[in-house]
Image (cartoon, rainbow, N blue to C red):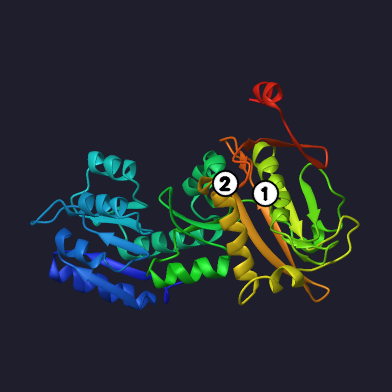
Amino acid sequence: MQTQNVHLLVVEDNPRYLSELLEWLQDYGYQEIETATSATQAQEKLQVPFDVIISDMRMEQDDSGFAIVSEVKARNLSSVVIILTANDTVGDCRTAFKRGVWDYISKNMPGNVYDVLHESIQDAIAYFNRWGNVQNEQWITENLETLEQNYFGQYIAVINKTVIDAADTEEALKQQIEERQLRRFLTTIRKIGDLRPISELIQLPESDRLEYKSTFQWDVKLNRENKDLRFTTLKTIVAFLNSEGGTLIIGVEDNGNIFGLEKDLSLLKNGNIDKLERTVIDSVCNHIGKNFTQQIKIRFEKIDGKDICAIDVKKSVRKAWLQRTKEKKLEFYVRMSNKSEPLEIPDIYNHL
């Protein structure tokens, strides 16, 4: 039974009944309880999130039950709403469930109504702890393509079928939710895009979805910087965008040998992997387009003591073009087997 960490808001305007209800809830073990005596007061209290809201349906001051349900939905709050009313009607009950309440309990029912309320709270907690929010899960599945365009490789938090936050790791996302004081009771957390560890990918040969490059801008043959080499990376990114997506790994030779990022990092002022990531993103913005950065995820992994970079690219709905600085002309690439091949105008027309 989970009671100590459940945050409750009780909305009731009858002092005698409110006192009795609080006494019973405390006997069951609930410790985090706030109260309100009207919908207006409850709406002010909702600045702080609650797991469960127990509300009377009809009060003298306002139509509180429906007002609170509407407020919860309007704010995308992750709160279960349970209606506890003496003025129960079939019409109100039907309306309440259509608006998304968890339960509708009559104070006039036979037996101990507080036992029924406690059981309802526990059922809600058990259900969502085990299954999460089915509506959120269904919404994510139905909108996966759009979500992959915007959050590829990230963890997202969804409340009431709305993305309310995102982060690169699940731990970081949970921390952000806590900092925003969002209760995680009805929050669905899902990773968008399946990114395999780099250590697993480098065991595979190059393909239409995987390519290796030794460096980003270090010329291995000339043993010096060569910024033109950046375009070999950008060419592959464009090809992945225009095809079925893929992963480009930098710091690994075609034969699978680990080269690492040491040479590339040495070319950057205060060179570190964050600086290299920023350099790659800036190159994408300048030569492919800022809008395509949402389809690109850059990550790093240390293998055999050396840093390796993976650039995961999601297939783009919009076609991508590469613009070189000097020539000022657009180039179009697609993946063919394990190569990024340019297309001329007739082939581009057929591809489109």
Question: Which residue position holds label 1?
Answer: 234
Q: Could you tell me which secondary element the residue under label 1 belongs to?
A: helix
Q: Is residue 348 above or below residue 206?
A: above
Q: Say which quarter of the image contains residue 298.
A: bottom right
The residue identified by callout 2 is 148
**Foreground mark, 1 or 2?**
1
* Number of numbered callouts drawn: 2
Q: Position of residue 346 (x, y in %)?
A: 69, 21
Between 79 and 319, the one lying in front of the other is 319
Q: Residue furthest front?
A: 326
Q: Closer to the N terminus: mark 1 or mark 2?
A: 2
- For the residue pair 162 and 65, the one nearer the viewer reads as 162
- When the figure is inspected, residue 178 is found, relative to residue 314, above or below; the finding is below
Q: Amino acid at mark 1?
A: Leu
Q: Residue at x 20, y 74 (%)?
A: 19
Quarter of the image where one finds residue 182: bottom left
